[in-house]
C-alpha cells in the first residue's frame, strides 16, 4: 500500500530545515501502524506526504501504486478524493452543519448522487454508533461524539487508506479508549490500512506495528504484541 524510498524533505528559508532525512519505509495493505517521535522528528511531514498534501524534495512516495512525488496538485487532489481519508485531533467539523451534513460533505464534493449519499451516510453513522445523532449540530455533541463524526466522514468515501493525526489528543482517557476500539473495529471489519501519528503510548499500543522517528529518520520499527486485535 505505502512505499517510501530515500525520501528527503527540506523547507527553504533563511536557513534550510530538513524535516525528513532519507526515509525508507514499507507499509502493507491492511496494516494498522503507529508513528511516534518527539516534536520535530518529522511525523507530521511524513503524514502529509503519505496523504499527498505535500511532495518530497527527492525520493519516491508510492501510495496504492501511484508515485505521488510525480503528480501535480490536481492529480494529488483527485487521488486523495478516492484513496485517502483523514481524522484530525481538532475534528474540523463545520459548526453550522448537522452531523449527517458534515459526514456527507466529501460525497457532495465528489459529485455522488443524492440518494446514494443518504444511504452511505446512514450506513457509516450506524457503524460509528451515531445513528440517533444525525440531526444534531457539532456543539451539541461530546468530544468523543465529535470525533466519531469525523471518523464517519473519513469512512464514508470507502477510501482504502485512513490517516489519523493525534485522534485521541483532545479526549479524556475513557473517550480516547472508545475511539481506539472503534478504529480497531474498522481495521478488523473493513481491512482498511490505518496510519496513526501520536504522542500517546496508549494509542500506539492499539496498533500492530510501531515506527519511531527521530531527526527525520526511522529510529525503530517493531511489532507490538496484541495490537489491532
Image: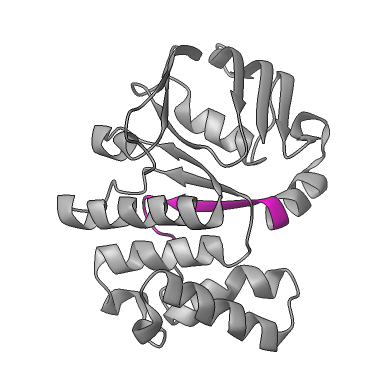
Residue appearing at x 78%, y 36% in the figure: 65
Left or right of 62? Residue 216 is left
Looking at the picture, how far across and down is residue 217, in whole percent? 50, 12
Residue appearing at x 66%, y 72% in the figure: 107
Q: Is residue 154 above or below residue 101?
A: above
- Would residue 89 be counted in the magenta stretch? yes
Left or right of 5? Residue 133 is left
Q: How is the image coloured?
A: one colour
- Would residue 165 be counted in the magenta stretch? no
Callout count: 0
Looking at the picture, how far across and down is residue 79, in whole percent? 75, 49
Q: Note whether residue 11 is visible.
A: no
Residue appearing at x 73%, y 30% in the figure: 62
- The residues colored magenta run 82-92
Depth check: 121 or 43 in front?
121
Looking at the picture, how far across and down is residue 207, in whole percent? 39, 37
Q: Is residue 179 above or below residue 95?
A: above
> What is the quadrant of residue 50 in the picture?
top right
Q: Where is the N terminus found, in terms of image quarters?
A: top right
Looking at the picture, how far across and down is residue 160, in whole percent? 63, 51
Depth check: 178 or 151 in front?
178
Left or right of 134? Residue 57 is right
> What is the quadrant of residue 61 in the picture?
top right
Left or right of 194? Residue 158 is right
Residue appearing at x 51%, y 82% in the figure: 122
Q: Note whether residue 196 is visible.
A: yes
Q: Where is the C terminus found, in terms of image quarters?
A: top left
> Which residue lies most toward the left here?
173
> What is the quadrant of residue 54 in the picture?
top right
Amino acid at each position: 500500500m505505502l512505499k517510501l524510498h530515500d525520501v528527503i524533505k527540506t523547507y527553504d528559508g533563511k536557513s534550510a530545515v530538513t524535516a525528513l532525512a532519507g526515509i525508507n519505509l514499507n507499509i502493507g495493505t491492511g496494516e494498522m501502524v503507529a508513528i511516534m517521535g518527539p516534536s520535530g522528528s518529522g511525523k507530521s511531514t511524513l503524514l502529509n506526504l503519505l496523504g499527498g498534501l505535500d511532495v518530497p524534495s527527492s525520493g519516491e512516495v508510492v501510495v496504492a501504486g501511484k508515485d505521488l512525488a510525480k503528480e501535480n496538485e490536481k492529480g494529488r487532489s483527485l487521488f486523495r478524493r478516492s484513496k485517502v481519508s483523514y481524522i484530525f485531533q481538532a475534528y474540523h467539523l463545520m459548526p453550522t452543519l448537522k452531523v449527517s451534513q458534515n459526514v456527507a460533505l466529501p460525497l457532495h464534493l465528489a459529485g455522488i448522487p443524492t440518494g446514494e449519499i443518504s444511504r452511505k451516510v446512514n450506513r457509516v453513522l450506524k457503524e460509528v454508533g451515531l445513528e440517533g445523532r444525525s440531526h444534531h449540530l457539532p456543539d451539541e455533541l461530546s468530544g468523543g461524539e465529535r470525533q466519531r463524526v469525523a471518523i464517519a466522514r473519513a469512512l464514508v468515501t470507502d477510501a482504502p487508506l485512513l490517516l489519523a493525526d493525534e485522534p485521541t489528543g483532545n479526549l479524556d482517557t475513557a473517550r480516547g479508549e472508545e475511539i481506539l476500539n472503534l478504529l480497531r473495529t474498522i481495521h478488523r471489519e473493513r481491512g482498511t490500512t490505518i496510519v496513526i501519528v501520536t504522542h500517546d503510548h496508549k494509542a500506539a499500543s492499539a496498533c500492530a506495528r510501531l515506527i519511531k522517528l527521530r531527526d527525520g529518520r526511522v529510529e525503530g520499527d517493531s511489532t507490538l504484541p496484541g495490537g489491532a486485535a
